[in-house]
Each structure stands twice: as structure tokens, then as C-alpha cells.
Image (cartoon, rainbow, N blue to C red):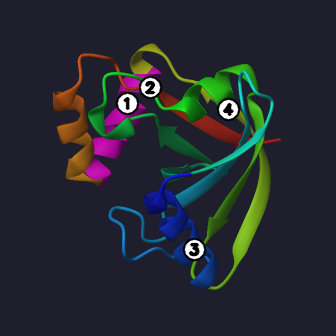
Amino acid sequence: MSDFNASVLAEFRERHGTVTNAAPFGNSLVVLHTTGARSGEPRVSPVMGIPDGDGWLVAASKAGAPDNPAWYHNLLAHPDLTVETGDGSAITTTQVHAVDLTGAERDAAWERFKQASPGFAEYEKRTSRTIPVLRLSPR
């Protein structure tokens, strides 16, 4: 795990789900507990989530890198996972199922990310790939 992710997770746990030292999180952090696609090992990844009904949307932006983040491949291989979310007073753990959005549904969800934080529009400009968006629905 990178030092950046470790510091984000430490603050998330210390502040019961609020992250102020790393934009754009605030109370929007979703901590993914995935299983490695190839290794089968447990992985933890903090990502920005947008509430969507009783679940969340997450974007595999990787800050506009030319390839998708490892956690995206992990979710495709093992779509049932656990997430942690928080509101500043408590952290909640939820069992979810990930679905990779396509077409107009993906495009509408991606627009929500660009509206939530201008950084996502910058990520889109940095890469030629279509940035995946996934819906995490409680199971």
C-alpha cells in the first residue's frame, strides 16, 4: 500500500470516516476490501464514492493514468466485497456487489464524478482510456 493510501486510511479510522487532508474525500471515502484477481490475497483501497440509492458509485480513474487501477481488475474477478464508509461519527461496514457500468448509464455516472470534483475532468483529459465507473450495491 502506498504511503498516501496509508495516511488516508489512518485519518479515515481516526476521524470515524472523515478525511480532510486529501481532497476530494471528506465524508466521501469508500474503503474497498477486495480479493486480488491473481494472488487471491486481501487488498484494501481507499477511493472516492458517490452515494447512489442505497449503494455507491466508484470511478477507476487512477488520476488519469493510461491503465486501470489494480482494484478495478480485482472487482471484475471478485465482484462481491466488503466496503467501509463513515460519516464522522461512525464507520459502517457493508457487503456489496460491484457492477461495471456501460453505455449511457456509465456516462451519466461519470458526469456525476466530474460535477463532484473538477479533478475528475482533469483525469479524463490525461488519458485516452474510458474511465470505468462501477456501482456497489448492498447484498
- As measured in the structure, the alpha-carbon distance from the residue carrying label 3 to the one carrying label 2 is 25 Å
- As measured in the structure, the alpha-carbon distance from the residue carrying label 4 to the one carrying label 2 is 16 Å
Which residue is depicted at the point 43% across and 14% down? Answer: 103
Does 33 lie within the magenta span? Answer: no
Q: Is residue 134 above or below residue 42?
A: above
Tell us which disc is closer to us: 1 or 4.
4
- As measured in the structure, the alpha-carbon distance from the residue carrying label 2 to the one carrying label 1 is 20 Å
- As measured in the structure, the alpha-carbon distance from the residue carrying label 1 to the one carrying label 3 is 32 Å
- Disc 1 target residue: 108
Does 112 lie within the magenta span? Answer: yes
Q: Position of residue 126 (x, y in %)?
A: 18, 30
Q: Position of residue 76 (x, y in %)?
A: 66, 21
Q: Position of residue 123 (x, y in %)?
A: 24, 37
- Disc 2 target residue: 68
Q: Secondary structure at mark 4?
A: strand
Left or right of 83: which side holds 139? right
Which residue is depicted at the point 38% across and 35% down? Answer: 61
Left or right of 102: which side holds 84? right
Q: Secondary structure at mark 3?
A: helix
Mark 3 or mark 2: whose residue is earlier in sequence: 3
Look at the image and give the residue range highlighted in magenta. Answer: 105-116
Name which quarter of the figure residue 74 lies in: top right
Q: Position of residue 87 (x, y in %)?
A: 58, 76
Provide the major secondary structure of the magenta segment: helix
- Disc 3 target residue: 10
